[in-house]
Image (cartoon, grey):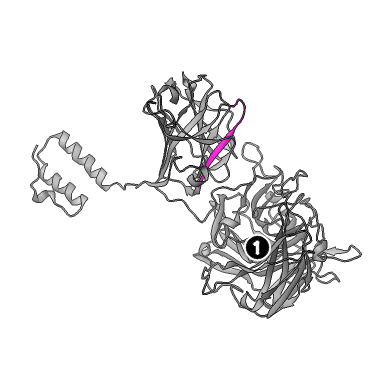
Amino acid sequence: MNCPTDEQSKPTNMKKRIFAYLKVWTTSSQFCIAVIATLILMALAPIAQAMDVFNSDFSKGTFETSGWKVKGDWSIVNFGDGKPDLAKNPGPVAKFPAKGNTTGTLTKAFGPIKTPGNLKLTFDAGYGWGARDHSQGLQVMILDPDGNGYSFVIQRAKATWGVQWGGVSQYGYNDNPHWNPTEIDATQPAVIDGGGLRTFTITRDAAGKWTFNSDEWTGGPVTFTDNTTTTFSQVVLCGTPNIDDLLFGKIKLESDKAPDTTLPAINELPAQTADYLDFNPGRVTLGSEWIQNIVVKSPALRSDVKGNVKVEFTAPGMTKAAALCWQQPTKEEPNPWGHDAKIADITLDAAGNGSFIFPAEKFPNGPVTVRVLASNDSKKDSREIQLYNTGGVVWNQGIPKTPPPAAKGMKLVFSDDFNGPLSISKDGKNAKYSAHKPGGGDFSGWQFADPEGTENPFSQQGTFLRIRGSKRPDNQSSSGLISSVKADGTGFYARAPFYMECRFTAQSAPGTWPAFWTLIQDEKLGGTPDTKDVNEELDIIEAYGGVGPGNPNHPGYSVTSHFWNQKTADGKKVEDKWKRIDMLGIGGKSYWSTTFHTYALKVTPTDTIYYMDDIEVFRHPSGELSKTKPTFFMINYAIGGISGWKIDLEREGNTTDMYVDYVRVYESENK
């Protein structure tokens, strides 16, 4: 075979090098040509560079310092202690003990990795002290933020079922595991017998092909293709019922895509009911440490303030307190999201009285929430004091001058800055908005009221729409909803592809339930006959206020897509899509009652996408109705009602406010 000269071996890039070889080897054999062709393809093909997502062992002493979240009776042991002659000594390892029917998990969480083209998990694992049973099993799960994904099990046996994989749904292992079609010898001697730990690899490619293998197996690898889950954000080591200690050593995850650190790795809390996700199931046990304790003496709740405002309160039995308020970016804290500013650490007297100065001029103009936190050794309270700052710094008010990134290529078709006279009526006649849900079905415990009545919940304060929930001493109560469609079915509808967003804040207190959501035009509102008795409800945000026993204790807010009375082609119910959003881990890391946030929805022919502050938080395939039928929006401040959550606003004077800054809607230019 002729070889290229030194000069020909120095092309400026790989493609030139290949063609240099091709020029010299044109007289070579067919074999040589085949090799050249292979080299050309290798040179021209893109190479996905793997990067470490994490590379962990248990030599740092604690699970916390190694970045693992522990559930169950796990410990770190060092097999090197007292065993200098032990063959294949693994050193420090995570151990789950032989304790009969107990279970536990070790979880390593990271920002979501969406549709990786190259995912590889390498881990060392084995058994401790020599007890053998074919039911012994090592189990590892790779999951998305909601606990969906894949489980991989190695049984201590030589059999077709010696190595298994299965689907995982909300952390529940599939009861129908998949076995290998051929026998695999996965028997493994214990560490105490000199067997050490065995290295296992799990890989996934861009097509969703999984490979599960160990170089020390006889038989294998296990391969399968599945794309049920395509986003990954946690690796879980499982402690299972066993008669021998389960051991894990070095663990490394590599990917061609970097984790998205702007999104939560784990959505901690599951839905509370299967039928309507965050409604009260009557069995809430969270929040026992929270009590209602703080009584505000001054200023008056929900009052206008400016300048230096003295806040006085009492918190009987509490030993310490602090005051905070969300502040716009400053020279010292330039974060564009703003930041949580501590106003004061407060010394309480023997009766629990305390006070501090709120410097309103240094905080945002308009609605602000001053939070007082008080605690003792076992109990705590967080009091949200709603005020309206008539001075202060104008920050992020009104409709932005630029369109949102997700609406690129779309045109503005609806907007309301609420900086002019409000246009709301009972049924929407002669107005922009109706004050009730079109088609009937108001759902608030404190009823949605008419703006024409004595309990009008709507007012304009500054450049904001204020929706007030209130109850009088005679128990007459009211709250508010606005709809872009009127009682007769006329009004504003968006047609996919569309994008809509709303910016608001409200108070978190027992019973408060602010929301921004949509329905389609069904037959009752003049829709086509195929919309009779069906609908599609897209809840862009439903927020549930209140902490303590019997309250939601919600970590953020919920997005839900309901496919009411819809069936699949084979007659099955179309399942709802939902997600709890842990907003304290996203963007500016602030709660919905702490400051304003923008909540948005985009519906395309393929995907329905939810956003918070321009950050995507949830996505699923679009439903048939929302992508083909006219869609209208509603904004409401419900208090209690069909959600089942109790109302307890006595210490708020049975009054609470929601402030809406703006709403706007875009549609595709190319319809």
**Which residue is rendered at x = 48% and y = 21% of the image?**
130
Type of the residue with mark 1: Tyr
**Which residue is rendered at x = 44% and y = 21% of the image?**
187
Read off the magenta span: 99-109
Horizontal side of residue 179 vs 582, given as left or right: left
- Residue 368 placed where, x, y %? 67, 71
Task: Judge whether 106 appears above or below 604 on screen.
Answer: above
Please tell me which residue lies in front, 486 or 308: 308
Report if residue 18 is visible in the image.
yes
Residue 388, by quadrant, is bottom right
Disc 1 crowd rating (10 Å Cα; few below 14, some 14-19, many 20+) is many
Q: Which residue is mark 1?
A: 493
Helix, strand or loop at label 1? It is loop
Horizontal side of residue 514 vs 156, given as left or right: right
Asked whether 220 falls inside the magenta stretch, the response is: no
Please tell me which residue lies in front, 292 or 653: 292
